[in-house]
Amino acid sequence: MQKSHSRVAAIHDLSGFGRCSLSVIMPALSAMGVQVCAVPTAILSTHTGGMGDVEMRDLTDYISGALEHYQRLGLEFDGIYSGFLSNEAQIDHCLEFLEAYPKALHVVDPVMGDHGKPYRTCTADIRRRMRELVREAGIITPNLTEVSILLGIDYPQGPLTTSQTKSYLARLGELGPAQVVITGVNLMSGVISNVGYDRDRNAYWRADCQYVPVAYPGTGDLFAAVLTGGLLSGDSLPLAISRATAFVELCIKTTYGYGTDPRFGVLLEHSLPWLTRDQILTGYQAL
Ligand code: PXL
């Protein structure tokens, strides 16, 4: 991969334990040669996935002040990348960031839930207003739970057909973003696909990985981070999807082999060197 000197503002939470959000986004993007400017939306002792009462501080008041400081400094960003938001007002602050850097790549990971259920911090207001943020995105990376919230449809149970998948991608594109990636789609048994759409080219792609019967928190964050790093370093959309898919599959399979507690996330430390090496990627096909 072509190395760049890109800088991205990452508007996400910092969860101390459990390997998700900024804890995995920062090392992944750094390994890819992309500088990360962390804009924490909240600090949590762990992620919210099954580790009991979480100690949490909301940082809504911090985000606008940080943006103002960066503007006073004249700092430029090549990418603005938003993820987990702890409060509906943070949608306004993300919109301010996007507006302040109109030429940057706008990546919105509409983090709201998984396995058909919203995260416990994801209020009805956040779910209702996420579409406002999606409207201003250049690219979004929802999972199927988030697709169902954004499109106002039931969470799809069971495998999807190709035409259903394409219809979801196109309908999400109609909400605003020119590029859409849906993660974790079950198109056929034993395989999980990440699917992508480029509205201007009317092109659809898929990159497949083997199904592993365990779910780790933070894999969506890692996927979106590697996708963002790829795009900022010159990958085409299908190559960036292929890169992010291959890396997340590597992390999951490495971790599954060791049998660690799934709540602790993937063993990123083992897999991170993969991101620093040039990879020959062909792992996508037309959808
Ligand atoms: O990986 C998504 C995520 C991000 N941030 C927090 C979470 C989760 C998923 O559980 O709890 C705090």
Image (cartoon, helix red, strand yellow):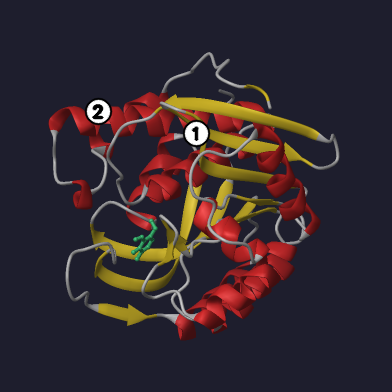
Q: Is residue 221 above or below residue 59?
A: above
Give the distance between the C-alpha atoms of the residues marked 1 and 2, in whole angstroms. 15 Å
Toward which corner of the image does residue 259 lie, by quadrant?
top left
Residue 254 is marked as 2
Residue 255 in view of the camera: yes
Tell me the crowding category of disc 1: few under 14, some 14 to 19, or many 20 or more residues within 10 angstroms, Cα based.
many
Q: Position of residue 280 (x, y in %)?
A: 53, 13
Toward which corner of the image does residue 135 lie, by quadrant?
bottom right
Q: Nearer the viewer, residue 226 or 167?
A: 167
- What amino acid does circle 2 point to? Thr
Asked whether disc 1 touches disc 2, contact meaning CB atoms under 8 Å apart, the reply is no
Q: Is residue 252 left or right of residue 119?
A: left
Q: Is residue 98 above or below residue 164?
A: below
Q: Is residue 150 above or below residue 284?
A: below
Q: Is residue 201 left or right of residue 165?
A: right
Q: Nearer the viewer, residue 174 or 73?
A: 174
Residue 235 in view of the camera: no
Taking the spot 75% from the left edge, 53% from the top edge, the residue there is 171
Residue 66 is marked as none
Is label 1 within 8 A of ligand 1 (CB to nearest ligand atom)?
no
Q: Position of residue 177 (x, y in %)?
A: 74, 54
- What amino acid does circle 1 point to? Ala
Residue 244 is marked as 1
Of helix, strand and loop, which one carries label 2?
helix
